[in-house]
Amino acid sequence: MIKIILAAAMLSVATPALAGDKPDPVRLKATVEKLVSFGTRNTLSSPTDPVRGIGAARAWAADELDKLGEACKCMQVQRIGRTFTGPRAPNGVEVIDVLGVQWGRDPNRVVIVGAHIDSRGSDTLDVTKDAPGANDDGSGVALVMEAARILSKEKFEATIVYAIFSGEEQGLWGGQLLAETARERGWEISAMLNNDIVGNTMGQNGIRVADRVRVFSEGIRASEDLPGQMARRGNGGEDDGPSRALAKTIDDIATTIPGGLDVFMDRRPDRFGRGGDHEPFLKLGYPAVRFSVGAENWTQQHQDLRTENGIVYGDTVDRMDFRYLAKVTAINIAAIRRFASAPAAPKAVTINGALSFDTVVKWAPVKGATGYRVYWRRTDGTRWTGRQDVTDTGLTLVNTSIDDNLFAVAAVGAGGAESLPTLAGPAPRP
């Protein structure tokens, strides 16, 4: 049955971040220092040396996740691998991702938080020199490990995957490996959060940016064919694809964390001309975003340790801000908690109302949903301004023109957690 209401503007209120154990800057620093102690984590370095190189680092990360799994009896450590060959690995290299899989009530619906463990110096092929990789991307790995430590104490509807990628510096191979594995396993991914360079506040221009974190998201979807893109264009949904909806929701979540960071919603898939491990997920149609610091320092990325012309080069621990990293971690944890507690997003939401001032919104039932939240806004805005909670799978909004408004629907679970909103599109023609 479709419920009919007179539309009225109502401000959308974000679900508050649940209280719980907080990320610890001291523990985050200890994790980064441990990663740096492996000397280099270049993907081409030794996979078998017990103390130096990528193999030792991956083994340590797997062992740490295994300890958490033993404590909670809820997590399984998995390793997935494949050989990749390219300009940055001309002789081929086995790329191995380490996964901590925290089983939810639904083993097939998944929330992923990831970071790459590999590091590099000035020459991607050089495996002999030290490549500390403290911020790029020891910071992200520390965040993932801290999220696992905190969230493994809780139970969720969805399965959480804590992903430690390799091969990012060679060509985003670790992200590609997991994205394709997810497709092969038939995972329904509600969100993928990639954290890469999330631990410094001093930019190369000498300006400190400690009040915000950038979250990058795509507009036009990499996975859409030309007819799909034209349909999105016709519907006016360029700013409401799954990745952009994910970024907007993370922005809302961040506002509920006292003393936290502002989310700078960067409306690009990544930094200009650059990429990260979330992009292979975008290519396969999964909602994915990248977290990165508000101000980068390129003398501390992909650089051999040295001093030239009075400039100190190298990605070392002393250049990091662990209080800031703890705040980025807190946003990730709150977002994971929300998406893993909520039902899946509605798969198809349709609208009808041409040549009418009323709009009819319909959608299919969602497993585990106890209700739904219908959103709308004028087409000249970017954030939802009205909402209505219903238990039916349809709603008629009176005097709310389909020509001048956009519409979306989110699924709400028994505990009040809400999925990403799915943008409504035209109903199929008979």
Image: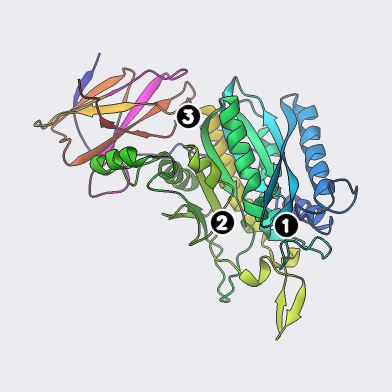
Tell which residue pokes out farthest to the top in this image. 1
**Residue 111 within the magenta-colored segment of the rendering:** no
Q: Report the front residue among 430 and 252.
A: 430
Q: Amino acid at mark 1?
A: Ser
Q: Are marks 1 and 2 in contact (CB under 8 Å)?
A: no
Task: Please give the range of residues in magenta.
Answer: 362-387
Give the alpha-carbon distance from disc 2 to disc 3, as whole Å.
26 Å
Disc 1 crowd, CA 10 A, few/some/many (<14, 14-19, 20+): many
Q: Is residue 259 visible?
A: no
Q: Residue at x 71, y 54 (%)?
A: 89
Q: Report the front residue among 59 and 145.
A: 59
Give the alpha-carbon distance from disc 3 to disc 1, as whole Å.
37 Å
* 328 relative position to 90: left or right: left
Q: Residue at x 49, y 24 (%)?
A: 415
Residue 308 drawn above or below residue 104: below
Q: Under tag 1, what secondary structure?
A: loop
Reading the image, the residue beneath label 3 is 417
Residue 408 drawn above or below residue 263: above
Tell which residue pokes out farthest to the front in this image. 91
Reading the image, the residue beneath label 1 is 119
Reading the image, the residue beneath label 2 is 292
- Where is the C terminus found, in terms of image quarters? top left
Q: Earlier in the sequence, mark 1 or mark 2?
A: 1
Q: Amino acid at mark 3?
A: Ala
Image depth: mark 3 or mark 1 in front: 1
Q: Earlier in the sequence, mark 2 or mark 3?
A: 2
